[in-house]
Amino acid sequence: MRMKCSFCKKEIPKGTGKMFVKADGTLFYFCSSKCQNNWKLKRDSKKVNWVRKKQPEEKKSKK
Ligand SMILES: [Zn+2]
């Protein structure tokens, strides 16, 4: 099963990353505590510079 980071959308290799379960049962995966912390702060990953750098293809979908 492939997991993707719920924050930066990077694929997480099996055996790494963190899983987070919200009180309502929603599952979230994070490639690092950095992503988890930013997600907790309710940051929009599209507005976070270090995430955007990782996703150069994001520019193509710009409308
Ligand atoms: Zn991540």
Image (tube, rainbow, N blue to C red):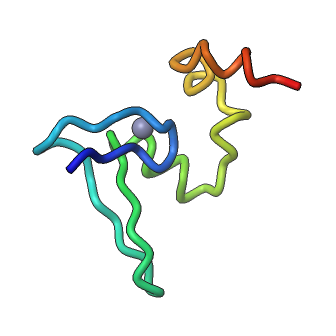
Image position of 39 (left or right of 45)? left
Q: Which residue corresponds to the image point at 66% horizontal and 22% vertical from the top-left?
A: 58
| Residue closer to the observer: 57 or 32 | 57
Ligand 1 is found in which quarter of the picture? top left
Q: Which residue corresponds to the image point at 14% horizontal and 42% vertical from the top-left?
A: 14
Q: Is residue 14 above or below residue 19?
A: above
Q: Is residue 9 above or below residue 21?
A: above
Task: Return the x and y of residue 38 as percentages of the image width and height.
Answer: 54, 47
Q: Which residue corresponds to the image point at 26% horizontal and 53% vertical from the top-left?
A: 18
Image position of 45 (left or right of 29)? right
Specify the quadrant of the image occupied by residue 34.
top left
Image position of 43 (left or right of 51)? right
Task: Return the x and y of residue 45 as percentages of the image width and height.
Answer: 63, 39
| Residue closer to the observer: 51 or 38 | 51
Q: Is residue 58 above or below residue 40?
A: above
Q: Quadrant of the C terminus?
A: top right
Outermost residue, bottom side: 24
Q: Which residue corresponds to the image point at 28% horizontal and 60% vertical from the top-left?
A: 19
Task: Return the x and y of residue 61 as percentages of the image width and height.
Answer: 75, 24
